[in-house]
Amino acid sequence: MTILQNVSLRPYNTFGMDVAATHFTVFNDLQQIQELSSMAWMYPKKYIVGGGSNILLTQPLEGLVIKNEWKGIALVDESDEHVWLQVNAGEIWHDTVLYAISKGWGGMENLSLIPGCVGAAPMQNIGAYGVEVKELIDEVVAWHWEENRFIALKNEDCQFGYRDSIFKQALKEKVLITSVVFRLSKKPKLNTTYGAIQQQLEKMGVHKPTIKTVSDAVIAIRTSKLPNPKDIGNAGSFFKNPVIHKAQFLSLQQQYPAIVGHASGDDTIKVAAGWLIEQAGWKGYKKGAAGVHDKQALVLVNHGGASGMEVYDLSSDIITSVHYQFGIMLEREVQIW
Ligand code: EPU
């Protein structure tokens, strides 16, 4: 296994930040895990990248960056209703979705076109259009650096929350996710409750949706609203949608009748951060090469040549301004390195 020195991470992050890592390696099979673990002590700080689609690099990284390219998909169990699919962490998420759809296995279709790799999916419990990946995960397998062994966490042990899991909390930087077992449905129940999906299906003239047409609808919606990192550097939603107390929401609604929010618990409302940021006047804003996307204010972009700090500073300005106007503290969803 080769460890390279002073490697630019530009190709490995969707923001396109040109930041160097002191040490860098690519991992693509099981044997390399053993090799890696035998030298792990030399690198107290390890950074795992998959698709690099949820990180903002703000400074050169001192440590070992491990690019996970371990691929492979295997059917590991089956019942009348379900299949259990073990997918190695380096598989591209969207390719996995398309593979499941081609086999007629349902569950992932609403999560079509989310950038990144399979290993990152449980990390932040990716979600879109009414589905979160926690609904599909049976088990996550990971290498534990300190214990020097594989651990398997069942769904209930992963402490999944909104864009959150044990891998961002207690196990942060302690493990390398190597594979995920998904439970998919042989008799798919479609989730088309999300208004945008219904409208898109109508537009497409689809009256009896299938997992394939729902996926096509999601792809069409995402393509129309979210910038393609190949064209404009970005990491999807930069902030989480904040969850606030119902009383605060009702009081804001008096002042801003158009505020967008959905119940997220008995007494709490999840507010559309994109709406707040747009109302605060940031949509389409540009300072140097850092900016706010003009079709979706939740997405910060690098128009080319912005530094990670410029994007970070912009995100701080947005947090301050939204807090000043609405009394709501936005939280970054993207990991800052
Ligand atoms: N909105 C605005 N202005 C904007 C953006 C959004 O007013 O600039 C309003 C929309 O009109 C809509 C509401 O906000 O009423 C919600 O917008 P949207 O449906 O686009 O979803 P979102 O809350 O902005 C979340 C996820 C996305 C996911 C979509 C669809 C988070 C942080 N983001 O965005 O996930 O694709 O729902 O389900 O939860 C990601 O995590 O990277 C991501 C793209």
Image: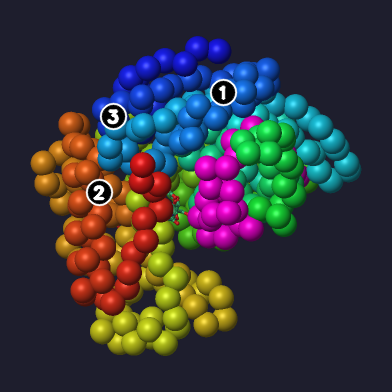
Q: Is residue 24 above or below residue 165?
A: above
- Disc 1 is placed on an element classified as helix
Total numbered labels placed on residues in the image? 3
Please name the residue shown 42% across and 37% down the image: 53
Distance, label 2 to label 1, CA atoms, is: 33 Å
**Residue marked by disc 1:** 39
Q: Quadrant of residue 184?
A: top right
Image quadrant of ligand 1 equals bottom left
Taking the magenta stretch, the answer to whether it contains residue 161 is yes
Which one is nearer the viewer's eye here, 43 or 260? Answer: 43
Of callouts 2 and 1, the N-terminal one: 1
Answer whether labels 3 and 2 touch (C-beta < 8 Å). Answer: no
**Residue marked by disc 2:** 312
Of callouts 3 and 2, the N-terminal one: 3
Q: Can you tell which of label 2 and label 1 is closer to the viewer?
A: 1
Distance, label 3 to label 2, CA atoms, is: 14 Å
**Residue marked by disc 3:** 19
Q: Where's residue 300, x and y in %?
A: 27, 47
Magenta region, residue range: 159-185
